[in-house]
Amino acid sequence: MTAEERAALASQLLQEAGTLLGQTGLFALLQQRYETVLVTGSAGYDLMVGREIDLYLPVEADAWPEWAGLAGDMARQLRDSGLALHRASFLNDYADPQALDAGLYWGIEFHDQAGRLWKCEIWGWDPFDFAVRQARDDSLRVDLARADRDLILRLKHEARACASAITSFDIYQFAIAQAGTSLAELAAWKGGR
């Protein structure tokens, strides 16, 4: 895949993501419920290589019962737009905090009108934690704007193709640091940190 093809695919996926969030009403549903919705990750940074959307919302810890009921509302919202919720995974990490800290989570999967699988990870963070994450996200966006965009897209495609354990965040940090140009260099750089 050439640099132009990678850029065109990223642009196409970003457009599809925006259209999907709007046409399904998922973004409006979440915004109505929680007011602030931050599109983050590859869709937020315009660095998409797959049909995946990450959303952060400020949600009080004691709102977990309402959060648990969100699946039914999302399923109805998708149904009303002609789609079907295929899979939904719920986590209440306030009950058992994991590595990403305490929060609420929905991971949903569904197929769009063209039959393409979409994955959406929706995180509800304590409002203070959300503000901290939003500030970090803003800082990362500034750093990514100065990084080699094609290097990031190329490495993300290569990592996906070989089912690498290297994450998008690893790739972002590697590109920002200008530490090399290959997955092998990234693995060595990550191992030496």
Image: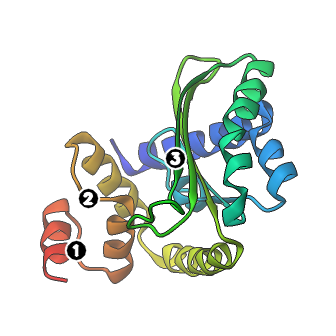
Considering only vertical position in the picture, is 136 above or below 21?
below
Residue depicted at 70% across the width and 62% down the height: 62
Cα–Cα gap, marks 3 and 2: 19 Å
Above/below status of 119 relative to 64: above
Q: Quadrant of residue 160?
A: top left
What kind of residue is marked 2? Ile
Residue drawn at x 68%, y 79% as measured from the top left: 128
- Would residue 94 be found to the left or right of residue 26 on screen? left
Q: Position of residue 8 (x, y in %)?
A: 52, 43
Q: Is residue 18 left or right of residue 148?
A: right
Residue 8 visible to the viewer = no
Q: Quadrant of residue 59?
A: bottom right
Mark sitting on residue 16: none
The mark tally for this picture is 3
Q: Mark 3 sits on what residue?
A: 10
Q: Which mark is residue 180?
A: 1
What residue is shown at x 83% (from left), y 51% (from top)?
33
In the picture of the structure, the residue carrying the numbered disc 2 is 166
